[in-house]
Structures are given as C-alpha cells and as structure tokens.
Amino acid sequence: MKYLMLFLLLPALLFAQPVEKVLCIGFDGMDPQLLQKYLDQGVMPNFENLIADGDFKNLETAIPPQSPVAWSNFITGMDPGGHGIFDFIHRDPKTLAPYLSAAQAMAPPRWWHVADWKIPRGSGSVELLRHGTAFWEILAEAGVDVTIFKVPSNFPPVDCECRSLSGMGTPDILGTYGIFSYYTNDPPEDINISGGRIIPVSLRDGHTKTTLGGPVNSYRDGDPESEANFDITVDRNSQTALLKIADETILLNEDQWSDWVTIDFQMVPLLKSVSGICRFYLMGTDPFRLYVTPVNIDPVNPEMPICTPENYSSELVDDIGLYYTQGLPDDTKALEEGVFSDHNYVSQSGKVLTERIQQFQSELDNFKSLDKGYLFFYFNSPDQTCHTFWRNMDEDHPMHENAGGEYQDHIKNIYIECDKALGMAMEVTDDKTLLVAMSDHGFAPYNRSFHLNSWLHQNGYLFLKKGKKPGDIEYLMGIDWRRTKAYAIGINGLYLNLRGRERRGIVNQGQDREELLAEICEALEQVKDFDGKLAIKHAYRTDEIYHGPYAKDAPDIIVGYHREFRGSNESALGEVPAEIFIDNMMKWSGDHCMAADEVPGIIITNRPIRALHPALLDLAPTFLALFNLEPLPEMVGKNIFEGE
C-alpha cells in the first residue's frame, strides 16, 4: 500500500522540486500532428527524450490563432480583451482606415522650416500598441535575471531591467515589415510587386551605376527617400559580379551571399545619418539578377529602439557578428512574387536559421552561468517554412503540381534542425531547471480562400456605392455605409456597422445588434463550398469570449475556419471580389488563421503537466508561480503544474 501511495505522490514530489532557472524555447508554428509524425519516424531524438522525461500536450492557442494575438496572450496571460491585439490589421472606427496592430510610429509634433530643410522641435517616438504587463517585467522586478530573445509583439521592447531583443513587428530601416531590392537587366513587364522593389538596370560593357533606397529623409521638405550609390561590374565569363558600395568592394560568384554590409544614409551633411545593414545575393549573371535584403536596423547603432538595455544589441554583435534585426527575416515575399525560386528561398531562410542557432548558443552560454534566471528564445523557422512549403509535401494542395519534389521534405528537415536546437538546450539543463518547448499555434493546409466581404455583399449585409461593382473596392472605400450592416477587415475579423461606434453606423445597439449577430453567426456556420464542405467551424462572438477593457474595440465576430479554408488577403484589406471562394494558388500554402481548435500548439516540459488542457494564457502565471510570484489579478490563465 505504501508503494502505491508513493507512486500516486510521485507527480507532487516532482512538482515540489525547487526551480532555480527556466528555459523556454518558442518554436513558432510547431504543429502537434507534424511533430508526432516525425517522432514516429524516429528523426526527433531530443524531443523524444524530453517527452520521456516529462510531458507532451497540445497547447490551446488564441482566438484567432494569429501570431501577434497568440504571443500577446503568452506575454500577458490575458486574452485580446485585455491586451488589445485582435489581428495583424485593425481599423479606426471613426475613419475606417486600416492600420497595423502591433506598433505605431509618431513623427515630431512640430518643425522649423529653413530653406529646403526641416528642423524637428521635439522628438518622434514609436509606441507599442499591446497593452498589459509582460510577465518578465514582474520577474525582473523580483530580481530574476531575465533574457527575452525576439518574442513577437514586443516592438518597441518593454522598458525594464532585463535583456531583450525585439522580434516580430520590428521594421526594417524604411519602417516597413521588409522591402527587398532586386536589380536585373531582364525585368518582368509589371515591376510593381508587394514587399519588394524591382530596379531595372542596363549593363554597358558589363557595368552600371545604381542606388539603394534608404529611409525617408524627414529633414528635407517633401520627405524624399535617402539613397546610397553603388557600382556593379558583371563578368559573365567568370559568372561573377563586383559591387562597390559604402567604401566596400564585394566580389560574388553566382549563388553566393555577401557578408553584412553597413551603410550610412546621409540625412543632414556632417550632422545626421542613419545606419542600416544589408546582404547582397548574386542570383545570376546572364541575365543579371542581384537580390538585396531589406535594409535592417543596424544593431550597433539602432535608429529605433530594438533592445533593452540599449547596448544589448551591439553586445550580440561582439559575440556573433551582425545579424537580422527585422522581425520576420525569411523573405516570403520574394518567393511569392517570383523573384526567389524555392532554392533561393531555402538559401536565404537557411542563413536566418544558421544565424539564430549561433545566437542561441551565445544565450545558452550565458544562461548556463546563472544561478537563478529565465531565458526565452524564439525560432521563427517552423512557421515560415510551413507557410511556404506545405504545397511541396501535400499532394492535395492546388499548388502541389507546380512545387516540384526537391523540397517535399523541407518542413521535416526544419523540424530536425529544431530538434538539434532542443538538444543544445538539454545540454545546459539540470534537475533544478525547467525546460519548456512550446509553440503559439499549429498548422493546417490552406487550399481555399473565402472572400468574407463578398459573402456579406451577396447576402445583403454589405452594399456598394452607385456605380461601383465587385473588384472596385480597396480599403473599404466605395462601400455604401448608409445601407451596410457588416463589413470585414483583417484576416479573421467581422465588424457590425454600429451606430455610435462607426462613423456612419446604422445598426442600433441593443436588440438590433443582438439579432444581427445571431443571424450572421448562424449563417456563417452553414456556408459551404462548391463540393459541400463546410468552410467555417466557429463564428465566435467576441462579447462572449473576450475579457477586459479592450473587448469593446474588438471585431464583433471572429471567423474560425475549418482546415483547408482561410479568409482571403483581399477581404483582409477591405476588398470585395466578385466570387466568394477561390483556390489558393499562392506559394503561401499552409496557414493557421482558422478555428483555434483546428490548430493547437504544443507544450513539452521536463516535468509532468497537471493541467488537462493547458493554454497559452496559462504560461505567464505559470512562469511567475515557478519563482514564487503571484499572477496579476487580470491574468486569465492558471499554473499548468497545479492542475485544473
């Protein structure tokens, strides 16, 4: 009997072991089904060993399961009603203008004008739009040594006594999420592309002069873009190109990358310049094709706040050299727009992962030396690879025939690289260190797009102005608001055109709102594609699932799709195409912006988890409890090691 009691008490004894350090690895987008598949194939030995020592469960994700929403849940222990991040894209209800949800840049309030120059009176700023207290602020205040490496939804980084480097949401030097440059003497007919710039060049005797675009020069009237000059000399015989830029001379062979190059963009001669970094990739010499990464914020001299303390980003340079500071560095846009082949993309994203592994080793060396501490480290590769290479492994995807077989195991190979990273962490983990491997959501095939605004239009909830037709609408401009009851903006969001909230709202608060919400939710969950498949699993009412002061700003309905379906990019940007469903013919072929229970994340620890259904919301209070700290009253989650 006593042995039975000892067996029953064993989990409690394990929980009682003191924790002096916590190491949490965030594998963005790691999917439990894919992970189990690769575990069964025997190619994930470190994950297998960690599971054997501890536990592996699905981790409930956010509603909607978009990365900025999910990671905000993780950071604050609150749902979107508490932290105010509902989607990648929000809208101003008074103007109905869309804007990016994560951060907002504000220019100096006033300027002196002298000739063609402007002199700022005051300073500009960048504001993090996520609300709430990050759990690591509480840890740091309690004296825990904390490092937060590239967690999303943390730009600019929270100002506290910890080491942190901002991740997803961190712009390039232009203030965008990443604009690459592509120089070629064989440009396509249409050079207007998303996420990049195609710069046609003419080679005379193999030589040309051109410029690289830099940040807007707000010190000059008209805010012209700054530029850096550079020369290119191409030798087709040797298949090389010689680049001269920023006092550097770079010789590249075909399919070769340069090291990072630091470029100073002059704003005010002798007084002000902005430093950025980029890498050059010679894709071919005949025709000439040169790719330049987005110009990243220079971690040695960051123009925008990217770290705490302010010297942390440059200390990393001392350890491993220059690196991507851009929030999502894998250039999926270059792939989608046809500038990159699959091979080119694998080459570029491989550089990102190699760099991240070097950074991880540097942080592990520091973590190992601590007596008491917390380290969070983020890997974006599983997410970006599943987005772009799902088509290669999935025979049912509409783009599979165009994908080719060379990279059908690319997702698997990235998981194997993640397993190696986990092995690195296990080498510095002792019995007083809690090791956590987790993801913010899982993944699913994205085969068909649903134009939500088109459905609203065809079902009498959204009307167009006289003379407008489907296909004419962009950013909600051209909609007849005097008759429109509902509209969509963002990937999963649907809003009612409420009187007193929207600028020209017509739906009354109270009974009218209640009846309309119920009607639309019921109708959405009955929508079928041409083959009879239900497209929408849950139409969530946010007034029933969100808690906190910002729930009033949320979409009225979050549309949660079945696997294979996702809201279209067109509806996300306020467009109204003619059709309701279309095949997804993009290389962006896997996704997670679906119903939350379709794409749970993973959580694996070296100790048993007592919660039956652990969730992202639980991790902030769990980390606090491990250091004997109380969660904040507004935190919704619970300690996963205390059960439910």
Image (cartoon, grey):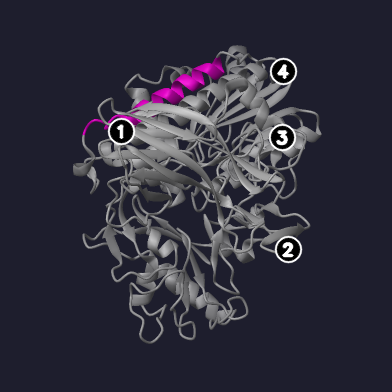
Other residues around mark 4 within 10 Å, as few (<14) / some (14–19) / many (≥20): few
> Which numbered dot is residue 370?
4
Residue type at mark 4?
Leu
Of badges 2 and 3, the one in the foreground is: 2
What SS does tag 1 mark? helix
* Residues marked 2 and 3 touching at CB (< 8 Å): no
Residue type at mark 3?
Leu
Determine which residue is flagged by label 3.
624
Residue type at mark 1?
His
What SS does tag 4 mark? loop
> Which numbered dot is residue 445?
none
In this view, the residue in front, 228 or 387, is 228
Q: CA distance from mark 4 to mark 1?
A: 41 Å
Which image quarter holds the C terminus? Answer: top right
> Which numbered dot is residue 343?
1
Nearest to N terminus: mark 1 or mark 3: 1
In this view, the residue in front, 475 or 551, is 475
Which image quarter holds the N terminus? Answer: top right
Other residues around mark 2 within 10 Å, as few (<14) / some (14–19) / many (≥20): few
| Residue 271, image x, y percentages | 72, 45
Nearest to N terminus: mark 4 or mark 1: 1
Residue 49 vertical placement versus 328 (above, below): above
Asked whether residue 537 appears in the rendered view, the answer is yes
